[in-house]
Image (cartoon, rainbow, N blue to C red):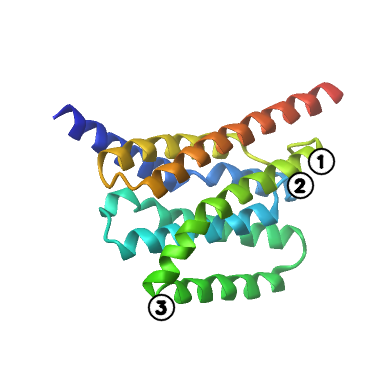
């Protein structure tokens, strides 16, 4: 009974957090009126990882509540992507990126081996997205308009997904992915806070 309640709490709290997870970042961009500190490469890699992971979960008919947040995350990332292109003065560049992502989604549905291969590379892709953001922060030494709240919420959802994976599918590939993402999300959050303090002191 307690295990069932824990599973429900993790599933629903993850879903609720993911419904607003990108809002702090979107609002931070809108308030700053620039995308300083936010890595476009990181966002695109994250979107690829989300699309692959969603397709994999759907293909193997995992419980809906264990991946229901991914369509919400993808929609919010697309909004964030449009904001970045808007502030970088290149809205026309958004269309080819979205077309490529939609084409990738279609390719993933063609064959089982494509889905499995993409999932094997998914952890690497998602980790690369975090490292791209870290590299951007290290080079700028300024967290700019990057939202620490968004990244800390991402760490929370990874932690809850570690629990739900252990309690449901016990898929090792999925579990390893969430553990790595948890560690990297914490690292990015700490880096954002570090450079925010540095900027405040310099001012």
Crowding at label 1, few (<14), some or many (≥20) Cα neighbours within 10 Å?
Answer: few
Q: Residue furthest right?
A: 202
Crowding at label 2, few (<14), some or many (≥20) Cα neighbours within 10 Å?
Answer: some
Please report whichever mark, 3 or 1, sits nearer to the chain's N-terminal start: 3
Relative placement, left or right, of 117 versus 149 is: left
Task: Relative to 83, say whether 111 is above or below.
Answer: below
Of the numbered discs in the image, which one, if any, rests on residue 140?
Answer: 1
Q: Secondary structure at mark 1?
A: helix
The reply to whether residue 145 is in sight is no
Please report whichever mark, 2 or 1, sits nearer to the chain's N-terminal start: 2
Q: Quarter holding the N terminus?
A: top left
Q: Nearest to the eye among marks 2 and 1: give it.
A: 1
Residue 57: image location, x then y, percent: 35, 58
Which of the pair 133/32 is nearer the observer?
133
- Name the residue that disc number 2 marks: 36
Q: Secondary structure at mark 2?
A: loop
Crowding at label 3, few (<14), some or many (≥20) Cα neighbours within 10 Å?
Answer: few
How far apart are the two marked residues, 3 and 1, measured between alpha carbons? Answer: 41 Å
Task: Relative to 138, say whether 34 is above or below.
Answer: below
How far apart are the two marked residues, 2 and 3, measured between alpha carbons? Answer: 38 Å
């Amino acid at each position: 009974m307690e295990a069932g309640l824990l599973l429900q709490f993790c599933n629903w709290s993850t879903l609720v957090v993911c419904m607003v997870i990108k809002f702090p970042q979107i609002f931070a961009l809108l308030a700053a009126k620039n995308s300083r500190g936010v890595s476009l490469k990181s966002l695109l890699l994250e979107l690829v990882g989300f699309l692959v992971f969603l397709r994999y979960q759907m293909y193997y008919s995992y419980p809906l509540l264990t991946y229901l947040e991914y369509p919400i995350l993808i929609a919010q990332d697309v909004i964030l992507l449009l904001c970045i292109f808007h502030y970088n003065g290149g809205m026309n560049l958004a269309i080819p990126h979205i077309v490529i992502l939609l084409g990738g989604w279609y390719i993933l549905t063609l064959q089982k081996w494509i889905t499995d291969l993409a999932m094997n590379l998914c952890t690497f892709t998602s980790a690369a997205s975090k490292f791209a953001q870290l590299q951007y922060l290290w080079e700028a030494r300024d967290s700019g308009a990057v939202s620490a709240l968004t990244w800390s919420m991402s760490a929370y959802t990874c932690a809850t997904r570690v629990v739900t994976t252990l309690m449901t599918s016990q898929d090792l590939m999925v579990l390893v992915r969430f553990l790595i993402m948890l560690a990297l999300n914490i690292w990015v959050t700490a880096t954002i806070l570090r450079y925010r303090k540095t900027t405040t002191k310099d001012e």
